[in-house]
Image (cartoon, helix red, strand yellow):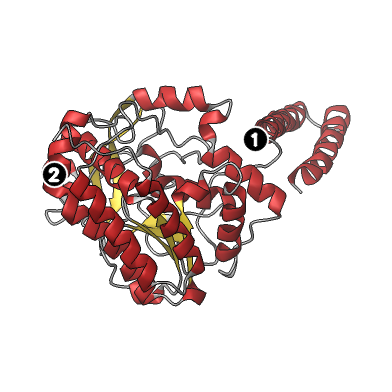
């Protein structure tokens, strides 16, 4: 353990200080004193951090060494993918990435977040090398409005994860896009379940992941799924439960006020990002003023930023990035997985028409029948059906 080794090192350093100051040179004495002082300050900070996290230490994620093969973490947008990204990094202590390489990381990550086949995702050329998938679901009646929040923030130049769209913006967008987005939600399930056998996939619902009783159990299943990757070692159930509490329930933690104040102070900064060919881009991204940013690098003609100063390989409709997307060592300060900096404000209730409500039920029942052999998925879909049947999210009078 860290503290056992450090305690012994402390004794060794103190012995060196004593010998150096009694029998050695003055400069050597002061060097050892400074070394000891810095170590003791570091240890006290680590102890403080460990205590503040309720006994589980969550360190900054690092690059897997030796390299590993990631899993896919697939979901429809608005289903808790960023929360799950933070949770996986906190559990494993290893980098995560996504299909657009928005944080400068490519294949050497523990998981690869993807929204494919929805329009914000893409299928990577090397997708066939990834043999397992985490499928993250959220009730479409909640996921689609959550995705619209992202669209609203992007279209109005608002910080990501800061604002829920007003109902006056939701209804016209919903009426224009509902059918396409419900189909995309459906395909986000069908694609991954049709391409990965049950032995190579884990299906998890957002609702279970954030539930006080089910959350630690679901996180344990996720941890054991991740540990099937050689080189991934997460720890016992007590640590898993503690990490879940600090990441998923971060808004209940003592540091939530500090996290949320950082959200308000985001500014446009230069960020280094890789493309498919391994080249790098510098582009402007909304980020917290507390993050250290990379120095600008010269851009070749082929790598020059496109609209809004973003890399050309990322489509405009996808480009609205979150501060903790930028974790690349040497270019941006590491993100804290216990401080996701999500504080959306605005109306939570987003109504549907009676016809749209019926379409949601039709899709849920169809998927439940199609994948009836997958007990976990069937249970999740049945919970969504029951939720829809008892929903008050219809706006017949409004329309």
Residue at image position (31%, 26%) is 346
Secondary structure at badge 1 equals: loop
267 over 106 or under it: above or below: above
Q: Nearer the viewer, mark 2 or mark 1?
A: 2
Residue nearer the viewer, 232 or 282:
232
Above or below, comparing residue 92 to residue 187 in the picture: above
Which percent across, then down, holds residue 96? 45, 55
Q: Nearer the viewer, residue 270 or 247?
A: 247
The crowd level at tag 2 (other Cα within 10 Å; few <14, some 14-19, many 20+) is few
Residue 278 shows in the view: no
Label 2: which residue? Answer: 175
- The reply to whether residue 357 is visible in this rendering is yes
- CA distance separating discs 2 and 1: 44 Å
Q: Residue at x 61, y 45 (%)?
A: 213
Q: Residue 271, located in which quarter of the rendered image? A: top left
Task: Give residue 121's mark.
Answer: none
Of the two numbered discs 2 and 1 on the same chain, state the one appearing first in sequence. 1
Residue 53: which numbered mark, if any? 1
Q: Position of residue 219 (x, y in %)?
A: 57, 53
In the picture, the quarter occupied by the C terminus is top left
**Location of residue 192 (image quadrant):** bottom left
Q: Position of residue 306 (x, y in %)?
A: 12, 47
Q: In what element is the residue under mark 2?
A: helix
């Amino acid at each position: 353990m860290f503290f056992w080794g450090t305690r012994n090192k402390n004794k060794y350093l103190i012995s060196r200080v004593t010998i150096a100051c009694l029998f050695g040179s003055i400069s050597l004495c002061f060097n050892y004193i400074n070394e000891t002082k810095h170590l003791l300050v570091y240890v006290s900070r680590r102890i403080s951090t460990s205590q503040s996290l309720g006994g589980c230490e969550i360190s900054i994620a690092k690059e897997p060494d030796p390299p590993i093969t990631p899993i896919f973490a697939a979901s429809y947008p608005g289903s808790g993918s960023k929360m799950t990204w933070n949770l996986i990094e906190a559990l494993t202590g290893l980098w995560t990435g996504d299909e657009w390489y928005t944080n400068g990381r490519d294949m050497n990550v523990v998981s690869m977040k993807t929204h494919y086949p929805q329009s914000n995702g893409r299928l990577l050329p090397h997708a066939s090398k990834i043999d397992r998938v985490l499928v993250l679901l959220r009730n479409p009646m909640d996921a689609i409005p959550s995705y619209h929040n992202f669209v609203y923030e992007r279209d109005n130049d608002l910080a990501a994860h800061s604002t829920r769209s007003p109902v006056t913006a939701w209804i016209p967008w919903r009426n224009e896009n509902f059918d396409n987005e419900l189909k995309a939600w459906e395909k986000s399930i069908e694609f991954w379940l049709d391409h990965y056998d049950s032995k190579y996939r884990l299906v998890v619902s957002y609702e279970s992941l954030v539930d006080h009783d089910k959350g630690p159990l679901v996180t344990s299943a996720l941890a054991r799924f991740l540990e099937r990757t050689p080189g991934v070692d997460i720890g016992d159930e007590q640590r898993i439960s503690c990490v879940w509490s600090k990441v998923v329930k971060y808004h209940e933690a003592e540091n939530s006020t500090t996290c949320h104040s950082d959200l308000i102070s985001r500014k446009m900064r230069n960020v280094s990002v890789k493309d498919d060919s391994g080249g790098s881009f510098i582009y402007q991204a909304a980020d917290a003023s507390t993050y250290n940013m990379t120095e600008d690098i010269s851009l070749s003609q082929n790598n020059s930023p496109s609209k809004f100063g973003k890399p050309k390989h990322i489509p405009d409709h996808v480009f609205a990035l979150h501060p903790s997307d930028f974790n690349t060592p040497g270019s941006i300060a590491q993100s804290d997985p216990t401080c996701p900096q999500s504080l959306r404000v605005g109306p939570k209730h987003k109504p549907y028409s009676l016809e749209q409500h019926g379409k949601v039920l039709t899709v849920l029942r169809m998927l439940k029948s199609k994948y009836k052999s997958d007990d976990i998925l069937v249970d999740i879909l049945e919970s969504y059906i029951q939720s829809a049947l008892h929903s008050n999210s219809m706006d017949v009078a409004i329309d």
